[in-house]
Image: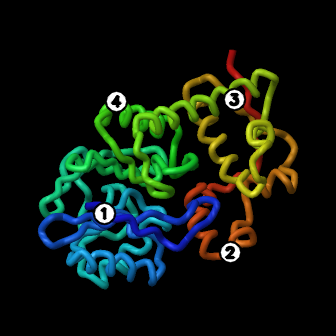
Amino acid sequence: MVTLVRAPNPSPMTLTGTNSYVLDCGDGTALVIDPGPAIDRHVRALIETAETQHLRIARIALTHGHPDHALAAPLLAAATGAAIYAHPRSKVARDADLPLEAEFAAGRLALHVVDAPGHTFDHVIFYLPAERALFTGDTILGDGTTVIAPPGGAMRPYQQTLQRLANEFADARTIYGGHGPAVDDPQTKIADYIAHRALREAQVVTALRDGARTIPDLVRTIYSSQPHALWAAMARQILAHLLALEAEGRVAARPRAQPLSPEEYAMLNPDLEAILGPAEAAALAEEIGAEMRLESLDEYTLVC
């Protein structure tokens, strides 16, 4: 049995909130996948959900270490005695590493752990064969698309992860994402995600055919219809595409002589606290790679 417990942290980036999942392990214990943000009432809701099913939370597994998915882990562990498991590359304090490309035993359940870099490099996806269910964290969401932001994420590994899901999990019947509703047609969703990234890259390449462009130029061209409040995240998406194309020799970058305008600086280095408040800002800063300050602009051109 899989039970969704949604965290009370809705925002433009987390949609209706972060999804935590309580799994009945079949032996009187429960596994929690992604305990969510450090909100006391959410931690209590997870414990109460397990208790209602006469279960004791014994294990906590993280899809990745972003704050809106992982910060509640030590709180839940302290309250229940549960052990915390995460990717070997995770910076999150844990009791043990997840076994990549192997089975993770949780009571009578056996989940396959897929190493799933892209959104972050410490990301995993869990596959539960008994339910034919994928727990995809922020790799695939129930609504919309996810952020791929350097330096914590990278576009080509992300696209390779999506293709792997399409190739290896054709029998999946449900996706439980890190945000949004469950997906009951996984192959269509995965195909849509693959097509979306290809479309965005084609838009970048098409824009560059008209001459040298900066990231703000490309954001204004490609995302003109989107709310300006989201442009900072979209700028990092563009950067991820450009870094991939540059590494492949398809795009060249050269420094632009003039300094950033105030508008450009605000787009590339947003004051997240002023926009969202301190709590939301801390989570979003890691999500969009805001620790990597962009103090100057490169101009990008196609390599003929």
Give the amino acid at mark 4: Asn
Q: Nearer the viewer, mark 3 or mark 4?
A: 4
Colouring scheme, one of rainbow, by chain, secondary structure, one colour: rainbow
Badge 1 or badge 2: first in the primary sequence? 1
Distance (Cα) linking label 2 and label 4? 41 Å
CA–CA distance in space, label 1 to label 3? 37 Å
Discs 2/4, front = 4
Q: Which mark is residue 124?
A: none
Pointers 2 and 4 in contact (CB under 8 A)? no
How far across and down, in percent of the image, does residue 106 sit?
18, 62
Q: Earlier in the sequence, mark 1 or mark 4?
A: 1
Residue placed most toward the observer, 33 or 233: 33
Q: Earlier in the sequence, mark 3 or mark 4?
A: 4
Give the amino acid at mark 3. Gln
Label 3's element? helix
- The amino acid sitting under disc 2 is Gly
Q: Secondary structure at mark 2?
A: loop
Mark 1 highlights which residue? 61
Residue, disc 3: 203
Quick one: 77 or 1, which is closer to the camera?
1
At 32% from the left edge and 33% from the top edge, which residue is drawn?
A: 170
Q: Report the front residue among 139 and 19.
A: 19
The residue wearing badge 4 is 167
**Helix, strand or loop for disc 1:** strand
| Distance between mark 1 and mark 4 Cα atoms | 25 Å
| 1 or 3: tag closer to the N-terminus | 1
**Whole-number angstrom distance, CA of label 1 to CA of label 2:** 29 Å
Q: How far is disc 3 from disc 4 in space, using C-alphas? A: 26 Å
Q: Which residue is mark 2?
A: 277
Looking at the rendered image, the disc whose residue lies closer to the viewer, 1 or 4, is 4
